[in-house]
Image: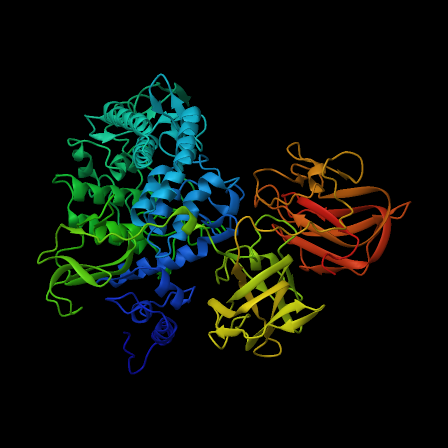
Amino acid sequence: MIRPNPSPSPSQTYGAALCALALTAAAGFAAPGGAILDPGEVLGRQTFWDNRDFGWYAENIPLFESPDAELDTTYYYRWDLMTKHLVYGSPADGYAFTEFIDRPFWSGTYGAISCPSGLQLADIRWFRDPRFARDYTAYWFRVPGAQPRRYSSWLADSAWGVHRVHPSREWIVDLLGDLIENYRGWEGERWDEARKMFWQIGHDDGMETNINSRQTQDGFRGAPGFRPTMNAYLYADALAIARVARLAGKAEVAEEFEGKAAHLKAMVQDQLWDPDRQFFFHMFRDDEEKDGHQVKAGTLTHESGQFAGADHGRELIGYVPWQFNLPDRGYESAWKFLMDPYYFYAPFGPTTVERNDPMFLIAKNCCVWSSNSWPYATAQTLKAMANLLQRYEQAHVDRADYYKLLRIFALTHRKDGKPYLAEALNPDTGSFAGHDAYNHSEHYFHSCFIDLVVTGLAGVEPGDGGALAIDPLAPPDWDYFALDALPYRGRTLSVIWDRDGRRYGRGSGLRVFADGEEIGSSAKLGRIEVSVPAAPEPTLAELKPQRFNYAANNSGAPYPRVRTSATADGSPRDKLNDGQYWYLLSPPNRWVAAADGDPAIAGIDFGITRTIDTVKVYVLDDGEGGAVRAPKAMRLEQWAGGEWQPVEGSAWDPPEPQGHRANTARFPGIATPRLRVVFERPAPDAAVGASEIEAWGPGSLPLPEPKPAEGNLALNKTGEGFPKASASHTSKWDTPAEANDGVVQYRAEPRNRWTSYESPNDSDWLAVDFGAEREFRAIHLHLYDDRGGVQTPQNYALEYWDGEAWREILNQRRDPAKPAGGTVNEIVFPAVKASRVRAVFQHAGNARSGVTEFAVWEKPPGE
């Protein structure tokens, strides 16, 4: 517990306040039987929290403490970071996770990207609620637009990793067909029959601008090569598929994939290992030429080309085979380079390329792996290192080295002394400068850390049955550590090291507990094996969701729809139901009520009657001096009998609104088409708002769907006849007809948009011709913004054709007041009669404007 000083500093005062808040919030949580650590006390030691829902943490995450306060801080920061990336995609799909919190245009459905999926799932599986990991695993195969092979990944191995922690034979066997189909997809796209290996380019391996790509004509993307990464990933996937097939009783399938794994193992060791340089390398698939230098097909890095014969070329990707225990004994000499400053070791490293390589480059901009410190590669290397130490015999690195490198990794999670992580950093200074441009990679989820603590430092090695090995890599001079409330095979585990038994009062030495009962111990800090009591495995029927968040909308469909009072600039209302929440000012994910609008109201129109019994409001509070404060009170209302009525029996937890956490109202189930929250401001001019609103209730899939919104005069699903869309300029990749086809798609793929990309004009228009005069009172502009060549316009004008000239539509009420990309811009006005209407966009700088849907309404929807 934090002890206040006689004259506490502001940070100490704040920390003490958080500690008290954590203790209070976690107090109502029933800790698992035999709990070692107190959630409120442990969580309250940290002062960085953005998400302060301490009761939720106490219920959902395993707790950890050690003598290393910096390591502990990073451990808990990573859980906070994951809450920023957690997305409730839809009632049908459940949960997913993003890589970038802002969901860039190249991401898939719900903002997920396959490149870090394996490392993400390694951490996510340690949530105590297995639904997060199971949903995200299934997402890659069953959600349209998920793009599982957009980047290299090891999804079958990851699925097996989830099954090891949260076993369900029916669940994993049900995925077998998906896992096989994905593997066949890789074979069709990336298999080289001549070399009998998989090829990949650096960009699609997540590793742009590397020392191999820079020797080709496309230095950013690279050229095809046989990489230790890709072939190790698919080796691991083949083994995982074989294991699932064995469970399913499909021996022929298992033997087929066991054969594939054995072949890839042999090829990696025979073809990608250089015995002279004692390392695994990239091999070029084709002849490549750059600046007059020729790289020959079939040669490893620096075996040909400008630097032929150089005794360098080692990249961290050479350690990836050990991430999956691929190499046989005899290749361990590669590890002598890791902790050597002449090669990979750095104060904030390791470096992605050995220090004295002729192409070594610490870049001040993103996506250069030649050799900035890259959290993704660092996490892979640490996982490989843990496997080496726990499963191989060698004398090149030891357990002290693992802790040293893990601690360095923990300390790289800092910016201005506060927990933070971006895409890359300078390995010598730890600076993220140049790598964390605004709204790019803040609090980046492209690596793992929790799993490195659980399976490495604490040594919990998940297996395929009840037998469990515990082999901690924690420093032998530590007097204590505890990993508590860890989910494993339906049990709750605790692993503690207490040298003299006085810290935890459970006896001295290394001790392991399951549901509070001791199942193994050792006087020394070393490997022990225990047997975890069997627990019933859930069936597929039991895993089907029974409760749903009916508010979430990530499809752009008309319903469920957010309805609010006046909105402050820069806080689009649909942030309230995008399934994602965080409380940062930069970048934001928030709706804020306009300061001059009273009352402040935010609600959800379901478009159909839903049964709701729980509402969660993720309240904003920017703190003393901040523009947005937690409301004084909140009132929950339902639409019934043609009017708004109080929701009877609703009680808020906590009783008074608190920011940076979910404020939850539970009540007897009500059937209603709409709900809303009325915020009472803490002061007359105070701004209030929320990051997310969830509305939960029972149900079963498939859910009844709302009827399509009626009255869109611009809608033309076929593109034939009228209404007809046209534009002053249209990009060669786009079409005006997709701007009035009823499809809203803010992502780049699958493409559905009109843009004026590459237009020579400073402004361009998009028009809809109805073919006859129509009366309308509202327009919805769904603006497309890829943050590149197409961006939110500086402004727009709405005009109608009066038969002779274009006239401005008068007395507009715009929400939001300023144009906002990636969301709907709603404009309401007195009735206008015209045969044509258009939006004229004033472009922002050198970017051009775009629209994914232009809807014209007889009356404002929902009126």
Q: How many marks?
A: 0
* Residue 572 appears in the rendering: no
Q: Look at the image and name its color scheme.
A: rainbow
Q: Position of residue 585 (x, y in %)?
A: 50, 62
Q: Is residue 202 above or below residue 467?
A: above
Q: Is residue 472 above or below residue 205?
A: below
Outermost residue toward the right?
804
Q: Residue at x 32, y 51 (%)?
A: 429
Residue 760 vs residue 499, the one in the foreground: 499
Quarter in which the C terminus is drawn:
bottom right
Residue 154 vs residue 288, the one in the foreground: 154
Residue 633 vs residue 815, the one in the foreground: 633
Q: Indicate left or right for 116 with 93 as reference.
A: left
Q: Position of residue 426 (x, y in %)?
A: 35, 48
Q: Position of residue 202 (x, y in %)?
A: 40, 32
Outermost residue toward the bottom?
6
Outermost residue toward the top?
194
Q: Residue at x 20, y 51 (%)?
A: 459
Q: Is residue 200 above or below residue 791?
A: above
Q: Residue at x 37, y 39 (%)?
A: 173
Q: Is residue 282 above or below residue 128?
A: above
Quarter in which the N terminus is drawn:
bottom left
Q: Indicate left or right for 672 with 393 as reference.
A: right
Residue 568 occupies which quadrant of the picture?
bottom right
Q: Position of residue 273 (x, y in %)?
A: 24, 27
* Residue 283 appears in the rendering: yes
